[in-house]
Amino acid sequence: MLRNNGKLASSLLMVLDVSMSGAICLALLFSHSISGLGDPLVVPGPGLLLLLAGAAGLIWPFTFQQLDVYASVRTLGFWDVTRRLLVAGCIVATILGAVAFALDVPLSREFPFVCAALQGLALSITRFAIYGVLRVARRSGRNTRNVLIVGTGSRAAQVKRSIDSNPQWGLCILGFLDDVDTPVDPSLFNAKLFGIGQMGELLRDQVVDKVLVAVPRSMLGRLEPVLSACSSTGVPLTMTTDLFGDYMPTPWIGNFGARPTLEFAMVHHNSFMLGVKRTVDVLGASLALMVSAPIVALAAIAIKLEDGGPVFFRQTRCGLYGRRFSMVKLRTMCPDAEARKADLVQLNEMDGPVFKVKLDPRITRVGAFLRRYSLDELPQFWNVLRGEMSLVGPRPPVPEEVIHYEISERRRLSMRPGITCIWQVGGRNEIGFQEWVRLDLEYIDSWSLALDAKILAQTVPAVLLARGAS
């Protein structure tokens, strides 16, 4: 049944999700220690009780649908499925809390999280049990899918090796299609080979569940018969995304007006997690601005008393993708510092396009103290609040530096700049430009909320000990 009725199986799984999650929520509502309710049949009453349990049951399949949890996981790994389930649990807990608040149900604060955790655990155990049974069945030749592979070169051979080494996927290769004069990979000499012109005949005479396209990009213009045959017969088609080499990231489907597109993000981060990062930025910057206000006020008085010049220094910096913005700092140099910069070029101690002078004669006495403990950076929390910067990210360069970047170095601009970064906690001016770029790119490629938390934790001792400051 599962082989020929994948949609029916998803529907049955959806019914199971609704039933289990609703029943768990209802049981927890009657647990006084968890729900905080005295007698649920009195407050909130049977009506609201069933409404809340029903909502808790329906939230899961709705969230799963948005995260493609009901899609086939045949070729997905354990951690890919687990990640989707964890994200779903966080979303459900938030929605459940909002529903309880909207219905004015006097539940305990921890109820939505405990309920979502237990529901998620039960649904996950059920899912992995079903997936386990299906994998065992596929290894024994049941619940299989038939695939045709378009291509006979190295990419097609690689796809075959992946299928052969993963019998739990349950994929059976019917054959390979290609142009008659195309070279065949030696590992496919004993396979069933067909010409592309036979595509329609194969789809008509064979049971084909999927067509896999694994050809070089030089052959894309000759795939019209394949696309036409699949479109006419309704057979799903999957195309491998390494057509332009290993350096191209995984694409996703988008739209440009009414036209469907393949979207390639050179730096691909989870949009939900980036949203969380932005939320942390707003909350953190708001708190930091309030806490640092007295320090900024005292620094402003000291700066004004020393030379009577302006308190703040605004400098044009390059942010996300090179977009320019005005970065705010407490002034640490004499008022005519920018005009004197050209006279100090020969004293530059940094390699690459960066300008740094350790004993810069333009720095004032108050400025030297502010720089030593990075107090001059405090107004940049305003830039974070405005969305021009982040708490953590590559430091924003000045346009004069960016115009000298190599093309590969511009990838530093592919993430919102930050107040602190790996470079700052690792020694700041003691690090050369190339190492600085390498650390920034390493941060961008391996970014996570946990990495941000780690850098923020390391920033405090780095600032207090004034490591590498000047």
Image (cartoon, grey):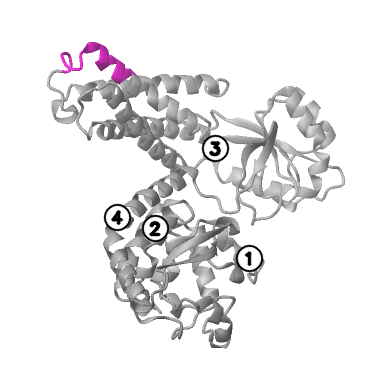
Span colored in magenta: 40-54
Label 3 residue SS: helix
Q: Main secondary structure of the magenta part?
A: helix
The amino acid type, in three-letter code, at marker 3 is Trp
> On the image, numbered disc 4 is attached to which residue?
290
| Residue located at (31% from left, 73% from top) | 302
Which is in the foreground here, disc 3 or disc 4? 4
Which is in the foreground here, disc 3 or disc 1? 1
Tell me where residue 108 sits by quadrant.
Answer: top left
Q: Position of residue 64 (x, y in %)?
A: 45, 30
| C-alpha gap between disc 3 and disc 4 | 55 Å
The amino acid type, in three-letter code, at marker 4 is Met
Label 2 residue SS: helix
- As drawn, the residue found furthest toward the bottom would be 346
Q: Nearer the viewer, residue 2 or 6?
A: 6
> On the image, numbered disc 1 is attached to which residue?
408
> On the image, numbered disc 2 is attached to which residue?
381
| C-alpha gap between disc 2 and disc 4 | 10 Å
> On the image, numbered disc 3 is attached to which residue?
169
Question: Dividing the image into 4 quarters, which one contains the C terminus?
Answer: bottom left
